[in-house]
Each structure stands twice: as structure tokens, then as C-alpha cells.
Amino acid sequence: MLVGRVLSAPKVKVAIDDQARRESCSVEKARTQARRYAMEIAADYSPPLVRAATLLLRPVLTRIYGGIDVHHIEHFKRDALGHEVVYVPSHRSHMDDLLLPYLLHAHGVVPPHIVAGANLNMPIVGTLMRKCGAFFIRRSIRGNVLYSAVFSEYTAQLVSGGYSMAYFIEGGRSRTGRLLTPQGGTLVMTIRAYLNQPSRPVMFQPVYIGYERMVEGKSYLDELSGKPKVTETIGRLLSGVKTVLRSNFGRVTLNFGEPIYLADLLATHAPSDNAEQPAANGKPRWVSDVVNELGNAINQQVNAAAHVNPINLLALTVLATQKHAMVEAELISQLQFFRRALDILPYSSRVTVTPMSPAEIIAYGESAGLIQRVVNPLGDVIRVATEEVALLSYFRNNVAHLFLESAWLACCFQHDRRIDQEAIIQSGDILYPFLRAELFVTWTPHQFGERLLSAIEFFVSEGLLECEVFESDAVAYRRCKDNKGGINRLRVVGQPLQQAFQRYYIVVSILRREGSGSMTAGELELACHVAARRLSMLYAPSAPEFFDRALFRGFVQQLRAQCWVSVDDDGNLVFDERLDEVASEAASMLSREQRATLMQATGLRS
């Protein structure tokens, strides 16, 4: 019945007629093709099978996970009343597709229809997923007008029918632990469906899904190191089940973030006289602005509902040292510092933190095989198992945004003993917008300045900084001389941002070396990727984000968005001397040795 309604929709009929003209075939043949597309896409939701799947999943999930925690779901149930709900979770694992509907069903909420990649529409597996509410979309639908029309209308029928949906706006699973740039395709379809048939108000529900171990961990490292992505097949899936069932992947946490209401965005962007009417081509001119703002808001609220687990804290701390090892007493002290930072400088009310003490965190990491204890008469040393170094950086990246102001301040004082307060606040004027876009942080530049002031007070209370007040009422801060371990703590706290500043330095240095108007954005991205891979192999094997071209692409896009560079008629990037300011700010966050290493390892030395 649903497929019949899709094929009878006016827009699909028009697409069928256009397909017949383009292919010089009969309308009936084009309609048959449209039906095949619809059957390829559509879910075949079966409540009895959903209940059976829940019962079957429970022992499997109990076996591979040490526990599953859910926070703020009662807030969600209250907010969702009277709304068409679209779940927009983070996407880090194939397990996301199972965990979200399973836990919703366990908490008395009807599981949503989930958008799944067509690569998962395999024999048996695809049928089961379809019966549990999955509907499938091809990786690329560009140029296929008929498929696009059918999929768009199918989505519209779900929205108008009051069915909840779930999809991953990142377009794929994150390989670095950071959220990926939102892809607007499914958001556009949802907005257009609502505009055409506004039956109930639409609420987007961000969900943070956090892991302590990744089922796909090894494959992620392989892909980032340059190996081709392996296509999923039923044979490969079944061959891996045995290994998965014998493994323990720690605990999983699902945090429900603050909801986002589509009506609020439309009230801001849509014309007041025809807010619900599409333009002649079916897409109002302002939809792009709504989609961009909505995608960023979703990722910001996902990050604002992060969970800090023991593995996140261990990764933040131990990976910050050159040898990936720390004396146990120092490690405990550093873990306590991060816990106090989360308490005194809370990111948001939806962030949750493990209740484990530092000693319990260390014992937990040892039992999971992520860290090793080396007994020594002068004090035991805790180090990361060699094979786990790169994977742990993934979990560090999950929560790096929660310590942004502390890490920023630590970077400032690693290389300068004394800085004026005004200079500290102004230090974020140039580089903070890039980090805000990359880490999907909610704070405005002004709010970030206020957060820096709070971080300064915290650092003073921790004995890392001390205040100097002059007769002119000017205020400055300097590193405490009495705190001998202070510089080491600053290095640990600032480490999560160091690689971001290094990437920025690489991009701007290559661009300035080649000259204005000499390379396209794609050529710059490739040059940076090659240089960063070389740097990672030589000096930073625990930094998989150096292999991720998307991070370089995002930075170049932000350079253009903030008018530091522009594009000429030939598609080349052009800039003026103002770009030197970005280079200078990035360099100021790096030590002289770090800059020399970057120049040598990436071939930037003149």
C-alpha cells in the first residue's frame, strides 16, 4: 500500500514520464523501474519480528558488552509528546543500528524506521533489517532523478504517516572518533516532506553513542593507513560473528541530547507569509540555510551530550606523553585533574562522567588489556600496550571538545611563561572559529572568551598559574615557579589540540609556499594529506586524524567561509598577506621544535 501511494504521487509520476522520455521507453517500463526502486528502498516493518529480535539481541549484547547505560531518556519522552520524531545519533559503529532501536523498545518506545546503506541490504541480513524497520538508500543517487524522486516521496509518506525515523547525518562511520561534517541529503528530504504535508511538528533528537572498545577498530586503522575499504558481504559478516561473540567491548552509553524543533528554524529562515509553501522547483531558496544550520546544531547537541568513560580519560592522559607511559602516581594526579576540570568547567548539563575513581580507572584499563603495569621499586609505570596506541587516540578524540578551553590555555602557556589577560582572550579571535567548526562546539567567540577566563581561575586554583596586577590595572598571568610539575601537566592538558594546530600549520604553510592562485582546493587537500601521512609515519603513529583527508578539506572550507582565501575563475585558491595572521597564530601554539619537525617531515623546509 505504501509503495502504491509512492508511485501515485504527482512528483513521482512526473519523474516516471521524464524517465520514459530520456530512455525512449514506454511509461509502463519506467513505472516498473520506479516500482523496483521503491521495493529496494522500502521497509516491511513487522512488530512480532521486532519483539523477537529484541529477545534475541538481549543475550548477544549482554555477552559482548559489560553493560549498556542510557541517560536523559525521560527528558526525551516528555519532549517528544505530540511530535514527529527524527532520531539523529552519532555514527561510530554498525552496532549503532542495533543499539538505538533495541534500547528504545526496552524503554517502551516504538523503534523508528532507520535509514541504512544499501551495502547492508545483503541476503538474509537485509530481509531481517527490513522487517525490523530499516529502509535502504544507495551511497550515491546523484544523477538518478527517478530514484531520488521515489526515495524522497517514500520519506514524505513516512513523515506524513507519523512514523518516527532515524538516520545518520554524518553519511558514514567516523574513523577518527570525531563527528563528521553533516551531509544534508536526508535532512533536505525530511524538511521538504514536512513542508508538503505538515501533519505534526517535527523534532530532531540528537543521541550520543559512546563505546569503550570498537567492533570495527582494526578495520578503521587499516582504512586510515591507506588500505581500501572492504565491502561488507554475508560471508564476511558471518565469519566475524564468532570473533565478536568471544570478545568483550566494555560498556556502551547512549545519552539523549537537547531536542531541536524544525518549526523554530523555519520561523527564523522561512518567509512569514508562506513558511509552509515550497518554491516552484519544490525547494525554497532558504532551505540550504536551514539544512546547514540544522546539521551543525545536531552535531553540536550530540557533542553536548557526550559521556566520558574510563577509556576516554586514560587516552587523554597517557597518550599525551612521548613514550605513552606515566608513573602511576602522576597518572592518578592527572586523572584527578581532568575530573576536577569536568566538575568546575562543565560543558553542558547533559554530559555524563564515569563514577570510577582514578585507581579504579587504571585497574579497569589493565583488565581490558589497554594498558600495562611495569613494576618498579621507585614507583610502578603505567604504559599503553603498543598495539592499542592508535586505537586509543580514537577515544581521546571522542571527548577532546569537553576540555577545549583548558587545552587552549595550556597550549598558550607551554611556550610563554607570562601572557597578558587581554592577549589570552584575543588569542582565540583567529583560530577558535576553525576549532569551533571542527569540534562542533556551541559557544560563540564571546562565550569562548568567558570560558577562557573561567579556565584561568581554575588553573590559578590548581597552582599552575599566578596573577600579576599592575598600577595601570592591567592583568597578566605567568606559570608558577614553585610548581615543578606544572609544565608537564600543561603538556598533557594541551596535547588534544596540538595535532589540530599542526594540521592548520601544514595547510597554511603549503599554501603560502606554493603562492596565491597556484593550486585548487583539491590539490591543496591532497598535498596536505601526503605531507601529514609522512609526518604521522615518522613522528606521530598514534594520530589517525593525520590520515583523514576530510579534516584538511574542512579546514580549507572554513578558510574560504571566513574569507581568508577565495577562488578565482580558474578554480585556484587566492589570498593576500592577511593569511600570514593565521600562520602566525597557528605557529604561536607550537614550540620551536615542533615547527622544525613539521618543516622537516613534510618537506616544507626551504
Image (cartoon, rainbow, N blue to C red):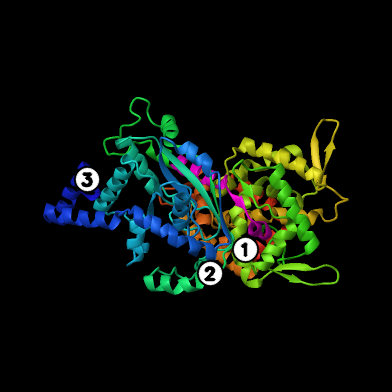
Give the main secondary structure of the magenta stretch.
helix
Judged left or right of residue 69, residue 227 is left
Q: Residues within 10 Å of mark 2 (few under 14, many from 20)?
A: few
**Spatial separation of the CA atoms under disc 2 and disc 1:** 12 Å
Who's the residue at 32% across and 46% down the image?
Answer: 155
Label 3 sits on residue: 5
The three-letter code of the residue at mark 2 reads Lys
The one of 540 and 33 positioned closer to us in this rendering: 33
Highlighted range, magenta = 292-315
Q: Position of residue 36 (x, y in %)?
A: 22, 57
**Sequence-wise, which precedes: disc 2 or disc 3?**
3
- Say which residue label 1 marks: 392
- Closest to the camera, between mark 2 and mark 3, is 3
Within the image, what quadrant is residue 139 found in?
Answer: bottom left
Three-letter amino acid code at the position of disc 1: Leu
Distance of mark 3 from mark 1, alpha carbons?
Answer: 49 Å
Apparent side of residue 207 relative to residue 431 in the rendered image (left or right): left
- Determine which quarter of the picture holds residue 500: bottom right
The answer to whether mark 2 and mark 3 are in CB contact below 8 A is no
